Image (cartoon, helix red, strand yellow):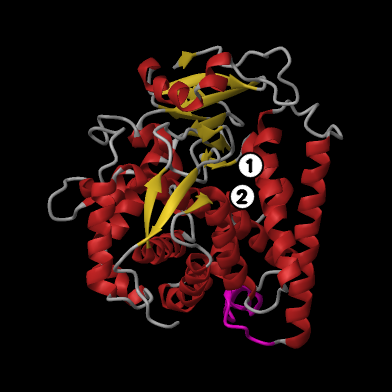
Amino acid sequence: MTTIDAIRPVPGAWPILGHTPHLLRDPLGFVRSLPAYGDLVEIRIAAQKVIVVCDPSLTRHVLGSDRIYDKGGRMFDRLREVAGSGIGGCPHADHRRQRRAVQRAFAPSRIPTYAVAMTAQSRHMTDSWSDGQLIDVYDETHHLITLIAITTLFADSITAGRLTEAEKDVRTVMSGIYRRMITPAALSHLPTPGGLRYDRARARLRDLIRMIIAERRATGADHDDLLSEIVTPPSAQHTALSDTEIEDQVMTFFLAGVETSANTLAWTMYLLARHPEIQHRLHKEIDTVLTGRPVTTADLPDLPLTGRIVTESLRLYPPGWFLTRMTTTETRLAGSPLPAGSVLAYSPYLIHHRPDVVPRPETFDPDRWNDHTSALDPRSAILPFSSGPRKCIGDTFAVTEMCIALASICARFTLQSVSNRPVRPALSAQLHPRKFRLRVATRETAPRTPH
């Protein structure tokens, strides 16, 4: 196992401490460089030793052995500040129980119901655009995905005012998590302006969710949404979640579902604008299948290019790019002894950009996922939603959401770049695109049918 003194303090960098100059300049390039040092590489982040697993098979072994390699490390400590012990960050001992309790909310039979809101919100967004308009892409996608998340979670239980405040609070919390993750523990709770905004946003989100859960308990009504599926006891043989546990699940869905899909949709729009030939093919597919009507889940099997574009965007820019696990017992990995409490990291971005895993890894090529011509299988070649027993429970929901949003946008508009400069990811807990704008041009074949 190779050790790299990867993290050194940078004068004047407070309150973001612990970056190396090259990690600050090019964090993704730094991560891509690690496999050259070996399958396991030790680095230091904010004075904490972290062992990065660079080999794909070893990564899948770690993810498949969650009893030994449990959720843990500085990132999950920060996530638990927000989401408590929800399904995304709870320890192995409680994960199976929680997963059974919320699984039915994400059952395939439920997705078409949620897709109605996905389509409606996507059409509402595109209705607000005009021919030739410059849009702030991430602002638009974040607003859309937040509306979808809140609508599918709470149906009609949230007012417009609450919705606006909740959207702002989700952004504040997500931007604060990464800052706290890379800041030494002794400094992470200092009352800085950013830290105070983070604390207030987290508290407001908790209060809102607690209030809606109490309203649901009082009325007992089924709103045909995600929350109704979780509040109602799943079955006689499964223990129902407490109100605090339900609150934790909702916070988890916010954190895991909004930023990830908003980032991916923004990156997808950016990639299509830079590859007009692929966008033209997408327009042709959408026009042929939809013939001017709104997209539904029944259409998705007939929109294979749409799905491949989303898959390739997830490969190039996986939202969760650097994640951690912690050993629960003394063990060995690739012949190296690991004491209990060792922090390991894995990077979907690193694996997705290894040329021995994906040929021409820096090229945007949706056809590499063509079932008929490619030897690659997205289920084994990439892991944007993790893998093993802790794989994201909402992966089907997220892919459906992104495909519906993309089809809705490209049915009506052509995405045009306004700059030749590439967009670089911001240093964050996820691969967040720095602010950029695209021009949307109304298509001549855009549907003109009434809603």
Which residue is rendered at x = 39% and y = 15% of the image?
A: 37
Q: Is residue 61 above or below residue 443?
A: above
Are the residues tagged 2 and 1 within 8 Å (C-beta)? yes
| Marking on residue 89 | 2
Residue 234 in the magenta stretch? The answer is yes
Residue 227 in the magenta stretch? The answer is yes
In the picture provided, is 356 more to the left or to the right than 47? left
**What's the residue type where badge 1 is placed?**
Phe
**What's the residue type where badge 2 is placed?**
Gly
Provide residue 169's location: percent of width, then percent of height. 72, 53
Total marks in image = 2
Q: Which residues are magenta?
A: 221-238
For the residue pair 152 and 330, the one nearer the viewer reads as 152
Provide residue 282's location: percent of width, then percent of height. 27, 58
In the picture provided, is 327 more to the left or to the right than 356? right
Q: Secondary structure at mark 2?
A: loop
Provide residue 369's location: percent of width, then percent of height. 23, 50
- The residue carrying pointer 2 sits among few (fewer than 14), some (14 to 19) or many (20 or more) residues within 10 Å by Cα, namely many
Residue lying furthest front:
132
Which residue is rendered at x = 74% and y = 60% of the image?
A: 165
Regarding residue 28, the answer to whether it shows in the image is yes
Q: Main secondary structure of the magenta part?
A: loop
Q: Is residue 330 above or below residue 240?
A: above
- Check disc 1 and report the residue beneath it: 76
Q: Is residue 79 above or below residue 246?
A: above
